[in-house]
Amino acid sequence: MRALICCVLAVLASGGVQAGPEEDRLALRKVYEDRFPGVPVEAHKDGVYAIDESARAQWQEIEEFPPYEIAVDAGEALFTEPFPDGAGFADCFDDGAVKARYPLFDEAQSTVVTLEMAINACRTSHGATAWANDAPELTNLVAYMAFISRGQIIAVALPASTAALAAYEAGKQFYMARRGQLNFACKSCHVQLVGNLLRAERLSASVGQVTHWPVYRFKWEEVGGLHLRFQECNSQVGAEPFELQSEPYRNLEYFLSYIANGLPLNGPATRK
Amino acid sequence: MAGEVKIRGRIADGVAELKALIPHDMETGTRRDASGALVPAHYIQTVTCLRNGTQVLQAEWGPAVSKNPFLAFSVRNAKPGDVIRIEWVDNQNGAGSGELVLQ
Amino acid sequence: MALNRRQWMRAAAVLGAAGALLTMSLRALAVSRPAFEATGVDDAIAKLFGGRPVEDSDRISFQIPDIAENGAVVPVTVATDLEGVTAISIVVDRNPNPVVARFVIGPDVVADVSARIKMGESSRVRAFVETADRIYSTGREVKVTIGGCGG
């Protein structure tokens, strides 16, 4: 097992001619398939609940009538509010069920565009002010769009450009790099120690980590976005977190989304 | 933050299985905010459930009921067209409600 | 519209029943509020039931996780096949105020309620079921963990 993981990490670390994103994705999937025999890779869309029975039972009870529904309702109302020039989000996002389109690499801006960025770009292009990246309106709208996008298959298409590949690689390097006082990398917990208990937390597999956002974390007692969790993880290893929607986090989201190709969107979700 | 009570229900063998989600902060009064100040207690104390205007259940809560409270219960002799209404009052005299017409 | 005698009788019965329900629940209310403010579990239970005796019962189905995923949201269901249930209560021994919730139910309500509760720490959790003249109880030890990633 350890030999396999080291081999996979070497493949991921090489980043050169030998291994491309597709090789990375398949190698990482293999790690989780071998580590959790009998658990289909797609099951990791449920994060830790794919590998923890008692937690799963409690989670399913809550999902009977989950608290994020309140955010989804608020988001639905926001989706139909007109902009100053009379247009609305529908002019940018059709019926709103477009979460699977993001994140994408925008060649013109030469950067990864997340749904949150696209929402604000839509607003400003129609005379409305952009929402702050931690604004509840933004989170609620993303919650609504995630909800109606459920079931869509993640299919991040890496454009054949050096800039897009560089963004993917930057995200991958972030995932691999140790940081903070505890000197952990994302891979430390989510590859090398995946499935183990960290105090009372069971560490989840990265292959399904982006599918279920935004998340109602009981710890937050409200819905929060993926980058908020990145910030929390970084802080928890004693590293300085980056800004929400900053380039490092957008690249990380891009990498993780590519790794999740083939898995269905299933957000929003509750988590502890 | 509080909003309208969401109620879901289905009739099975004449019994209405009801589930409700009530948007409410349910502050215990022991939590501190970012500045270190105590957030005042703000929680639902009474929940009344009515079927066609008649009370069928009354709940009394303390602040240890979870935020955005969930409640599930079942009512016998239910018929399509029955109106289920849930009302709540909190310790700051705030109130809210929600309704569902059973199908 | 004029009601015939049968309709009057039925209307009176319904109003009477509703009135009785209301009176019953108001009386129940008068007992409960000081119980919610009590801080020790023995005192809380005494206040909840006016010192009346409580007996263990194995006819109460008490669904609550052995290890709660998160102390802020612990799903719990109390159900029983005992007849004539008038109220169901939930008490968490080690909460600052042990009495968490009390559900007063009318005759048409199935004795089966679910809620989500907060637990400050690992504790015994008790469910109480009241009938017209008796009070039954059961309990479980529930562990509450601190999250490993600092919570």
Image: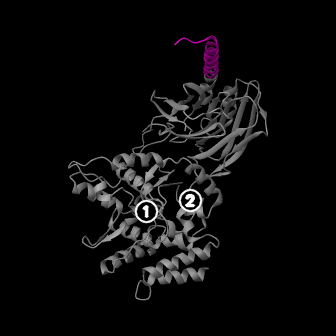
Magenta residues (range)? C1-26
Q: Is residue B54 depicted above or below A116 in this figure?
A: above
Relative depth, front residue between B73 and A179: B73
Q: Is residue A185 visible to the viewer in this orientation of the structure?
A: no
Going by the numbered disc 2, the residue's amino acid type is Gly
Which subunit holds the residue at mark 2?
A: C
Which residue is painted at 40% across and 67% down in the image? A253
Residue C148, numbered circle: 2
Give x and y (percent) for residue C95.
61, 39
Q: Position of residue A3 (x, y in %)?
A: 59, 83
- Nearer to us of marks 1 and 2 is 1
Residue at (37, 70) in percent of width and height: A251
Asked if badges 1 and 2 are on one and the same chain, I answer no
Per the picture, the main secondary structure of the magenta-coloured stretch is helix
Please report the residue visible at 54 percent of the width from the left and 82 percent of the height from the top: A6
Residue sitting at x 37%, y 49%: A136
Q: Chain of mark 1?
A: A
